[in-house]
Image (tube, rainbow, N blue to C red):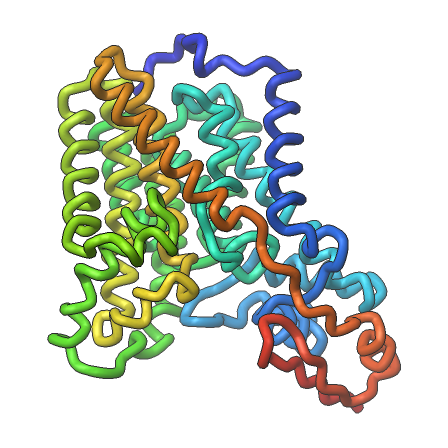
């Protein structure tokens, strides 16, 4: 396992810990002001979780969507049902904020040994994105999946309380989204290469059982998105590697469109090869996190390519499906931050340059455009009176239809 002695970059005092959480909250407020000051449903937040909780109540937690369970959003919807309907969008957003800060707090734990942890934490809410992830319980699964990555590299539980909390956490997150199935190889990697212990065996056993549950629903969920032909889709692969990796992450959408796609695709491949080479040459303490990050990012990317294997071209535009690239982007940036901790000045320089480019790319679209205000409070009164109502919700063109007695 990693060396338990904290270095100056890894150690975080209580006051610094709180400061990082507050700073991340402030970034969230600035990037998504409507989520705080004009909360509204976004897509499946209303169309799925609110509506099905209204009709199915607690039994909705076992209803799969998109081929897998969503236990945490379902529970948020259920407990929000005890409050006035007009409060529900705000409660959903509050739940997202709490869960995001939970993930950041987990990263800052003393059981996780990584350099520049405040910078790693800020990255979670700072990455370049198009408004597809933050402030929506529908997509909170992509934020929570970060904890599964952290499970792979954290120290083993030292107390019964830690073991119990770890077990509850992995169960809740494992039953929210397909990531426990995708990351099962990482739990195997942990027990073989990182820490051969009863704790690692416990994590692997729980992850395996959860994978069976989610895997069953995924298997029952039907076929992946498919339209068009395989050859045509494969032609889009270079564009995705160019625009959605190097392009989005380092140059932003406008500049990427002006750059040669062959150059951007080659940059993506060289970046991956460079990070892998760095990991091989560095000591074990820096090598293993980068291996885990690269492997985790590759798993998500390959799963995304498989899902859209007949229709890859729909992932090329910047405004489509950012969520599928959030975790790979995050893990690339985390790998660069670990590289910056190297004693090799060349690695430090290249990492610093690329991290600066990520920051500039983020600032190019840092604040999300305001949501359309559909005046939820007006419709909520009709819902409380158990009237049939059709409610427009964000994004534009979505409607929540409530049919009550």
In which quadrant will I find the C terminus? Answer: bottom right
Residue 94: x, y in percent? 70, 50
**Residue appearing at x 54%, y 34% in the figure:** 104
Q: Nearer the viewer, residue 2 or 325?
A: 325
Residue 367: x, y in percent? 58, 50
**Residue appearing at x 28%, y 33% in the figure:** 190
Q: What is the total number of numbered labels drawn onto the structure image? A: 0
Q: Is residue 236 left or right of residue 82?
A: left
**Residue appearing at x 19%, y 18% in the figure:** 282
Q: Is residue 258 above or below residue 347?
A: below
Q: Is residue 385 left or right of residue 90?
A: right
Q: Is residue 385 above or below residue 249?
A: below
Asked whether residue 209 is in view, the answer is no
Q: Quadrant of residue 213?
A: bottom left
In which quadrant will I find the N terminus? Answer: top left
Asked whether residue 264 is in view, the answer is yes
């Amino acid at each position: 396992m990693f060396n338990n002695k904290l270095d100056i970059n890894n150690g975080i005092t209580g006051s610094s810990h709180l400061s990082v959480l507050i700073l991340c909250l402030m970034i969230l407020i600035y990037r998504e002001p409507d989520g705080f000051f004009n909360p509204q449903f976004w897509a499946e937040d209303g169309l799925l979780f609110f509506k099905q909780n209204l009709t199915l109540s607690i039994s909705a937690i076992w209803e799969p969507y998109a081929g897998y369970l969503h236990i945490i959003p379902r529970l948020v919807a259920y407990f929000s049902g005890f409050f006035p309907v007009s409060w529900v969008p705000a409660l959903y957003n509050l739940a997202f904020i709490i869960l995001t800060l939970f993930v950041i707090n987990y990263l800052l734990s003393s059981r996780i040994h990584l350099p520049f942890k405040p910078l790693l934490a800020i990255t979670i809410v700072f990455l370049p994105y198009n408004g597809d992830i933050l402030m929506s319980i529908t997509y909170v699964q992509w934020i929570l999946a970060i904890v599964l990555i952290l499970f792979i590299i954290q120290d083993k539980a030292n107390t019964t309380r830690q073991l119990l909390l770890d077990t509850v956490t992995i169960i809740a997150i494992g039953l929210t989204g397909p990531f426990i199935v995708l990351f099962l190889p990482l739990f195997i990697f942990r027990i073989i290469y990182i820490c051969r212990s009863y704790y690692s065996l416990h994590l692997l056993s729980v992850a395996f059982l959860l994978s069976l549950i989610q895997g069953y629903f995924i298997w029952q969920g039907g076929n992946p998105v498919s339209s068009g032909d395989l050859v045509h889709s494969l032609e889009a692969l270079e564009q995705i590697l160019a625009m959605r990796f190097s392009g989005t992450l380092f140059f932003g959408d406008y500049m990427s469109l002006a750059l040669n796609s062959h150059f951007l695709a080659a940059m993506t491949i060289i970046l991956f090869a460079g990070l892998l080479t760095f990991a091989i040459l560095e000591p074990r303490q820096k090598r293993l996190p980068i291996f885990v990050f690269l492997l985790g990012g590759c798993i998500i990317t390959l799963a995304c390519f498989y899902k859209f294997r007949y229709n890859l071209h729909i992932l090329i535009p910047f405004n489509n499906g950012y969520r599928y690239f959030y975790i790979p982007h995050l893990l690339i940036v985390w790998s660069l931050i670990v590289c910056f901790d190297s004693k090799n000045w060349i690695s430090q320089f290249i990492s610093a340059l690329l991290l600066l480019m990520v920051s500039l790319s983020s600032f190019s679209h840092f604040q999300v455009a305001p949501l359309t205000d559909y005046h939820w409070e007006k419709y909520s009164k009709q819902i409380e009176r158990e009237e049939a109502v059709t409610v427009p919700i964000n994004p534009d063109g979505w409607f929540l239809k409530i049919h009550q007695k």
